Image (cartoon, rainbow, N blue to C red):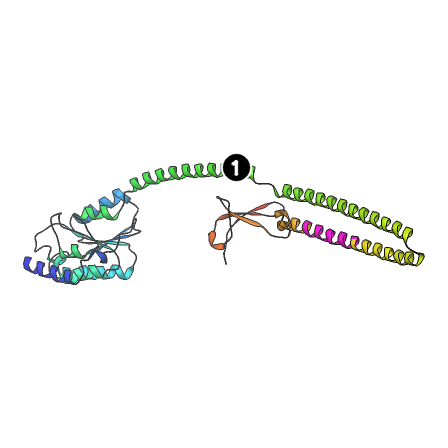
Amino acid sequence: LQVAFEQLKSRLAAEGIFDEACKKPLPFLPNRISVITSRTGAVIHDILKVAHRRFGNVPIQILPVKVQGYGSEIEIVSALHFVNQLRNSDVIILARGGGSLEDLQAFNSEIVARAVFASEIPVVCGVGHETDFTIADFAADLRAPTPSAAAEMVLPSKTDLLRRHVSASQALIQRMYSSVDMRRKRIQEISRRVVHPRRRIQNHRLRIDDLTSRLAGRMSGLIHRERERLDWRVNAICMHMPPSRMNQLRNRLRQCRENLCFRIRSVCKDENARLKAHTARLKGLSPDAILSRGYSITFALPERDIVRDADAVHLGQAVEVSLASGRLHCRVEGKS
């Protein structure tokens, strides 16, 4: 039997059945555990006792099989196939108590090793005592030294999980408070530096008024200077030119005055148009004007991050919608 054990072990190892890369990871907390073992003996009681102590509300499905003697290999393989067909368990415990090499022969058979390897559900093998090694141990995703140890490996301690949960919750709450306080200080600091849009609009209005006043002053000065030059030229013409020349100059003077008035009106019209355009652009840049046209700003709660993409929120999440007048507190019921 020992020679057959070594030969089978070498052959299956050459095929890669024992490779670590083929081992499937165990779930952190299985929803259901299937136990394949004998209906009699202390193994099943030890597993149930350990499971009740570590995480008592996890369902355990027991599949009783023969673990030694004639037909035991077929029953073990059938039980493995049955659990994989049901697909209602997250992990399988294959276990039995200690015994001689002859007693453990079913777990040293090739068909059992291949069935364990082919299982899509992770298999934990806890056969015999700590010093006992079987072919099924090498083919399994995890070997446990004893059946009780297999239950220990499969199930985490609920007490430890609750303790870690409380510790993590306290740390999360502390970090949340710290983050909120830091962000509040940041917002206050930014608020002190950011100029309010109304104030910026008022500053632009004052600048426009100043430019308008300066433009009017320059236009008045230009008109006054042009008028003085025209008067000087008229006087010079009247003093040095004959009457015919005077009529021509009068007509030219009238034409110049008309052109000057037309130019003044044109310049005033262009400047007024520029003034209206600047005013309209300032109003269009105001956030209040954008909201008054029917737009809104959506914040994801509780962080109040601005939502720009539907993937940034999940179903059932609370959001806050800021409108031109008031706010809406909503909850996401669908996305598209």
Which quarter of the figure has residue 327? Answer: top right
Query: Can you name the residue that lies furthest to the right here?
Result: 243
Q: Nearer the viewer, residue 162 or 171?
A: 171
Q: Is 56 displayed left or right of 139 in the figure?
A: right
Q: Which portion, as a residue range, is magenta? A: 264-278
The magenta stretch spans residue 270: yes
Check disc 1 and report the residue beneath it.
189
Q: Is residue 196 above or below residue 60?
A: above
- Residue 194: x and y, percent? 57, 40
Give 201 or 135, whichever is nearer the viewer: 201
Q: Main secondary structure of the magenta part?
A: helix
Residue 155 x/y as whole percent? 26, 47
Q: Quadrant of residue 217?
A: top right
Q: Position of residue 1 (x, y in %)?
A: 6, 58
Report helix, strand or loop for mark 1: helix
The residue at 73%/44% (across/down) is 214
Residue 282 in view (yes/no): yes
State the residue in front, 71 or 143. 143
Q: Is residue 18 left or right of residue 262?
A: left
